[in-house]
Image (tube, helix red, strand yellow):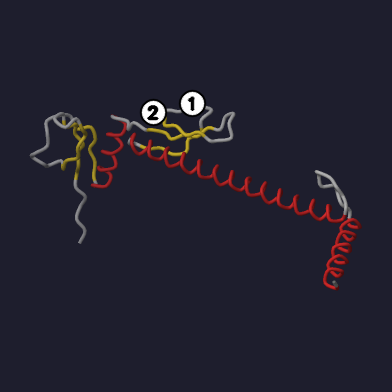
Amino acid sequence: MTQPERRYVLILDKRLDYIRLFRADCPLRPEGKALWEGDGLKRAYEAMKSLNRRRKPVLCYFVCSSQKSSKFKKFRCFKSTHPKQWISVSTHTAYREAVEAAKRLREAERSRQDNLKAARKEKRHSDRLEKEAMLGRLRRVGVITKKVPKLTEKDRRYLEWIETRDAESEDAA
């Protein structure tokens, strides 16, 4: 046996400055005009939430990113709206949460930039070692230069032949 849906009303409680939900037959409901009246608790609760939201809109803080002239992304918090050139990353209702989110994003961007910088440094170092090794090979053959020349496949084979010949003559001695 199902129970019939009860009748509910929404009334502005001036003491709390909030629209509250009451049963229509409740003796404790405050005085005032019913802002909404209908059947069903769920519908009444949804109506209460929407009326309170429209009555007092929630202040939002936007965490936004921008990548203007520099390589680094910048992150800032804006209240209510954000400028066109900034891209909204997340939305928060509490200022502290928005600031913490911006701080986390800044730290992530900084670590990403540090990783890129370390990778570039490592690549430069390996390129320098490779260049020095090639210049060493060329010096042993008799080529004196500060820059590594463009070598053809024949040049590389010739270098390998000379190195193997020298290694065999050292082994024989």
Q: At which x and y percent is residue 129? A: 71, 51
Is residue 68 or residue 10 the one in the foreground? 68
> Which labelled disc corresponds to residue 79?
2
The image quarter in which residue 81 lies: top left
Which residue ends up furthest to the left in the rendered image? 27
On the image, numbered disc 1 is attached to which residue?
83
The amino acid at mark 1 is Pro
Side (left or right) of 104 relative to 147: left
Near-viewer residue (124 or 159): 159
Q: Amino acid at mark 2?
A: Lys
Left or right side of 59 for 150 = right
User: Image quarter for residue 95?
Assistant: top left
Q: In percent of the image, x 53 and y 28: which residue is there?
A: 85
Q: Is residue 20 above or below residue 124?
A: above
Q: Position of residue 169 (x, y in %)?
A: 87, 69
Q: Which element is circle 1 on?
A: loop
Identified at 76% across, 54% down, the residue is: 133
| Marks 1/2: CA–CA distance | 11 Å
**Residue found at the very far bottom of the displayed protein:** 172
Checking the image for residue 56, the label placed there is: none
